[in-house]
Amino acid sequence: VECPPNGQGIIALLATNYLKAALETLGLESTVSFAHNSAEYLHLVIESLRLAFADGKMFVSDPTTAKVKVSELLSPAYAKQRVASCFDKSKANPDVKAGSPL
């Protein structure tokens, strides 16, 4: 039994939101247009995970003491903001900092 929000679950949801937002910025609906494990596909997935882990490390905590609500972290508007400020389709961003969903 998990007491939400537990780390792995919310990190996966964040990464999914960021991946979706990154695809939208590229004008795509899904990763189907990329060959599996191609450089482009892996870049999207890895950069989405970088954003998710940076935010998770900063904001995921006990729900009774959390400064940021889960709904704010998982909002599509926040995902678009994060991707717009941190995602570069042509190169990796090795120094991802947590965002500011407030």
Image (cartoon, rainbow, N blue to C red):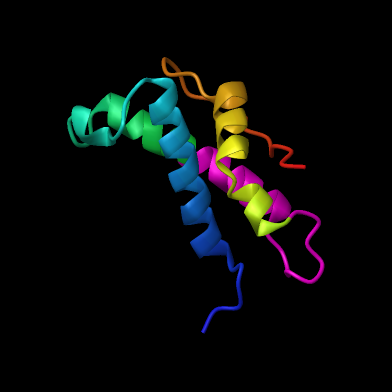
Work out whether residue 44 or residue 102 is closer to the camera in this orientation and state it: 102
Quadrant location of residue 95?
A: top right
Q: Residue at x 32, y 26 (%)?
A: 28
Q: Position of residue 77 (x, y in %)?
A: 60, 36
Task: Name the residue furthest top.
Answer: 90
Question: Is 65 a magenta residue?
Answer: yes
Residue 99 lies left or right of residue 17; in this view the side is right
Quadrant location of residue 5?
A: bottom right
Residue 63 lies left or right of residue 42; in this view the side is right
Task: Name the residue furthest left.
Answer: 35
Range of magenta residues: 49-68
- Count all numbered tags in the image, as a single digit: 0
Task: Name the residue furthest bottom.
Answer: 1
Q: Is residue 41 visible?
A: yes
Question: Is 87 a magenta residue?
Answer: no
Q: From the viewer's perspective, is residue 59 above or below residue 102? A: below
The quadrant of the image that shows the C terminus is top right
Q: Residue at x 53, y 39 (%)?
A: 50
Q: Residue at x 71, y 41 (%)?
A: 101
Q: Position of residue 55 (x, y in %)?
A: 64, 46
Q: Is residue 34 visible?
A: no
Q: Position of residue 51 (x, y in %)?
A: 56, 39
Q: Position of residue 46 (x, y in %)?
A: 42, 37
Residue 33 lies left or right of residue 95; in this view the side is left
Q: Residue at x 54, y 59 (%)?
A: 10
